[in-house]
C-alpha cells in the first residue's frame, strides 16, 4: 500500500508562524472577542509578566496584527490599550482554520506488511 500523503493546504489554511507561538495565540484569542483591552487587563487575564507581554505585543505590532494606543486618563497615568487589526483578525481566523484542518485530517494508515 502506498503511503498516504496529506492534501495540499487550501488557501487560508497555512499555519501562521507569528500567531502560532502559544503566548501570541492566546493574545490574539483574547483580542478577537473584544474591541480593545487595556494592557494590564490583558496581562492579568493571561497570567504573564509585563516584559513577556510587551515582547510578544511588539512582534504582533511589527506584523501589523495589533495596535497599541496610549490613552490619557482623567486621573493618573495614561493607559495602553491593545486592539487586533482587521489583518490580525483575518490572520487569526485563518490560523484557527488551519489548526482545525490539521486536527480533522485522518491519520496515515500504517502498512500491516511492515
Image (cartoon, grey):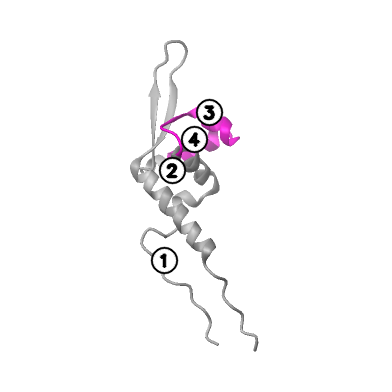
Q: Mark 2 to mark 3: distance in Å?
A: 19 Å
Q: Which residue is mark 1?
A: 9
- For the record, the magenta segment spans 33-58
Q: Which residue is mark 2?
A: 59
Residue 78 percent location from the top left of the image: 43, 19
Mark 4: secondary structure: helix
Q: Earlier in the sequence, mark 4 or mark 2?
A: 4
Q: Mark 3 to mark 1: distance in Å?
A: 36 Å
Q: Which residue is mark 4?
A: 54
Q: Mark 1 to mark 2: distance in Å?
A: 25 Å
Q: Mark 4 to mark 2: distance in Å?
A: 9 Å
Q: Mark 3 to mark 4: distance in Å?
A: 13 Å
Q: Earlier in the sequence, mark 1 or mark 2?
A: 1
Residue 77 falls left or right of residue 22 = left
**Residue that sits furthest to the top in the current view:** 75
The answer to whether mark 4 and mark 1 are in CB contact below 8 A is no
Q: Residues within 10 Å of mark 2 (few under 14, many from 20)?
A: some
Mark 2: secondary structure: helix
Residue 110 falls left or right of residue 82 = right
Q: Earlier in the sequence, mark 4 or mark 1?
A: 1
Mark 1: secondary structure: loop
Q: Nearer the viewer, mark 4 or mark 1?
A: 1
Task: Name the residue rendered at 49%, 76% in the picture.
Answer: 5
Q: In this view of the protein, which residue sits in the foreground, 27 or 110?
A: 110
Residue 110 percent location from the top left of the image: 61, 80
Dominant SS type (magenta):
helix
Q: Residues within 10 Å of mark 3 (few under 14, many from 20)?
A: few
Can residue 109 be found in the magenta stretch? Answer: no
Task: Name the residue rendered at 42%, 50% in the picture.
Answer: 93
Amino acid at each position: 500500500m502506498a503511503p498516504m500523503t496529506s492534501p495540499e493546504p487550501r488557501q487560508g489554511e497555512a499555519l501562521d508562524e507569528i500567531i502560532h507561538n502559544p503566548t501570541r495565540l492566546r493574545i490574539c484569542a483574547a483580542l478577537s472577542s473584544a474591541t480593545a483591552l487595556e494592557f494590564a487587563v490583558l496581562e492579568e487575564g493571561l497570567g504573564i509578566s509585563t516584559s513577556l507581554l510587551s515582547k510578544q505585543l511588539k512582534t504582533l505590532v511589527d506584523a501589523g496584527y495589533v495596535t497599541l494606543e496610549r490613552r490619557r486618563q482623567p486621573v493618573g497615568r495614561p493607559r495602553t490599550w491593545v486592539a487586533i487589526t482587521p489583518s490580525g483578525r483575518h490572520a487569526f481566523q485563518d490560523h484557527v482554520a488551519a489548526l482545525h484542518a490539521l486536527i480533522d485530517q485522518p491519520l496515515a494508515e500504517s502498512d500491516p506488511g511492515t
